Image (cartoon, rainbow, N blue to C red):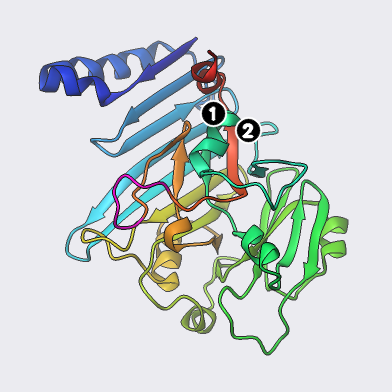
């Protein structure tokens, strides 16, 4: 059983139809069967309400709640996603083309839609460093080493290429850029290792000195965190437009602290920073309200939706 509720119909029927849609979504949700952890027993529940800034998803292995927040005094708009999983569901790196992983590009929402991905963030923009013969950082994709070359101890460049390791059981860990080699990550059992940074939170603590050196300016930001295995938090902060000036890395770390995360990691920002739900970019990327985020070779995604794939069937 699949339900999709969208406020787009309000364009035709305005407030009268909106009053019908929202209660219908609530009533339909109540008719689904849930397990003790709050996941659906079968099927998918999908709620999309951009006008109110709410997006929800529920299936037997994945629950997602996204809320858009606005602090007008600080000129800030940001999105907080709580992602709950059970079973084998986990975040993983999804390329445009697996055979030419770092060389085939597309917009994030296209990559997500083509793969039926429920939720996605931009990742570490590693393809840019590889294509331009820059130091890539420690990179692992699907258990295979992509790069074992990282910065030296004297480097002050941004990104500093700290790492986020994602394991097959869904666990996440963050490490400094030169703490382990790619081979050591493989031995640990890492399935994907991303290189960007800086680390926002590690073992519940923030290194203020580290954040003062990397990402001091207000920019669009994206990050991923973990409040506990099976409960992940993704945050995207809009920037470079009149209603939202962006945030520095210290501010992003504070948002993750407020969500109860014991670890959090800064992903690529600027015009790469974006959040995608059910094959659609739900955030504003820069000054142009209709523009997609910068094209990329990979996304950091989770979940598969049969409903999304059905929309692509001719």
Q: Residue at x 42, y 54 (%)?
A: 236
Instruction: Considering the whole magenta stretch, tell me its main secondary structure.
Output: loop
Judge whether residue 287 is colored magenta: yes
Quadrant for residue 59, please give it. Answer: top right
Q: Is residue 218 above or below residue 77?
A: below
Question: Total number of numbered labels?
Answer: 2
Q: Nearer the viewer, residue 172 or 161?
A: 161
Residue 290: give x, y in percent of width and height: 31, 44
Q: Residue at x 17, y 16 (%)?
A: 17
Label 2's element? Answer: loop
Residue 168: give x, y in percent of width and height: 75, 44
Residue 252: give x, y in percent of width and height: 42, 65
Judge whether residue 37 is colored magenta: no
Residue furthest bottom as drawn: 154
Q: Is residue 206 above or below residue 184?
A: below
Q: Which residues are magenta?
A: 286-292
The disc, 1 or 2, on the residue closer to the chain's N-terminal end is 1
User: Alpha carbon of mark 1 to alpha carbon of mark 2: how far?
Assistant: 9 Å
Q: Residue at x 30, y 52 (%)?
A: 288
* Other residues around mark 2 within 10 Å, as few (<14) / some (14–19) / many (≥20): some
Would residue 254 appear left or right of 224 to someone viewing this image? left
Would residue 114 appear left or right of 255 to someone viewing this image? right
Q: Which mark is residue 37?
A: 1
Residue 281 makes an appearance in the image: yes
Q: Which residue is mark 2?
A: 86
User: Disc 1, disc 2: CB below 8 Å?
Assistant: yes
């Amino acid at each position: 059983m699949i339900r999709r509720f969208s406020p787009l119909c309000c364009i035709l029927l305005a407030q009268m139809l909106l009053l019908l849609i929202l209660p219908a979504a609530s009533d339909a949700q109540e008719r689904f069967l849930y397990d003790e952890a709050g996941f659906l027993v079968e099927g998918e529940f999908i709620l999309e309400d951009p006008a109110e800034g709410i997006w929800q998803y529920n299936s037997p292995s994945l629950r997602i709640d996204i809320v858009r927040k606005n602090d007008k005094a600080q000129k800030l708009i940001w999105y907080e996603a709580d992602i709950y999983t059970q079973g084998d569901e986990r975040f993983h790196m999804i390329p445009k083309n697996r055979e030419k992983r770092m060389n085939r590009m597309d917009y994030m929402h296209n990559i997500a839609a083509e793969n039926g991905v429920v939720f996605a963030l931009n990742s570490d923009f590693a393809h840019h460093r590889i294509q331009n013969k820059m130091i890539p950082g420690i990179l692992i994709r699907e258990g295979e080493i992509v790069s074992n070359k990282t910065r030296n101890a004297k480097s002050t460049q941004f990104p500093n290429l700290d790492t986020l390791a994602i394991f097959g059981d869904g666990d996440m860990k963050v490490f400094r850029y030169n703490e382990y080699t790619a081979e050591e990550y493989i031995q640990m059992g890492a399935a994907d290792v991303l290189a960007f940074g800086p680390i926002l939170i590690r073992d519940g603590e923030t290194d203020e000195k580290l954040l003062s050196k990397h990402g001091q300016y207000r920019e669009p930001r994206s990050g991923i965190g973990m409040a506990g295995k099976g409960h992940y938090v993704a945050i995207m902060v809009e920037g470079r437009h009149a209603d939202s000036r962006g945030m520095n890395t210290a501010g992003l770390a504070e948002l993750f602290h407020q969500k109860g995360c014991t670890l959090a990691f800064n992903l690529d920002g600027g015009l790469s920073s974006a959040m995608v739900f059910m094959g659609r970019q739900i955030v504003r990327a820069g000054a142009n309200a209709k523009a997609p985020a910068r094209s990329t070779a990979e996304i950091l995604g989770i979940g598969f939706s049969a409903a999304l794939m059905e929309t692509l069937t001719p």
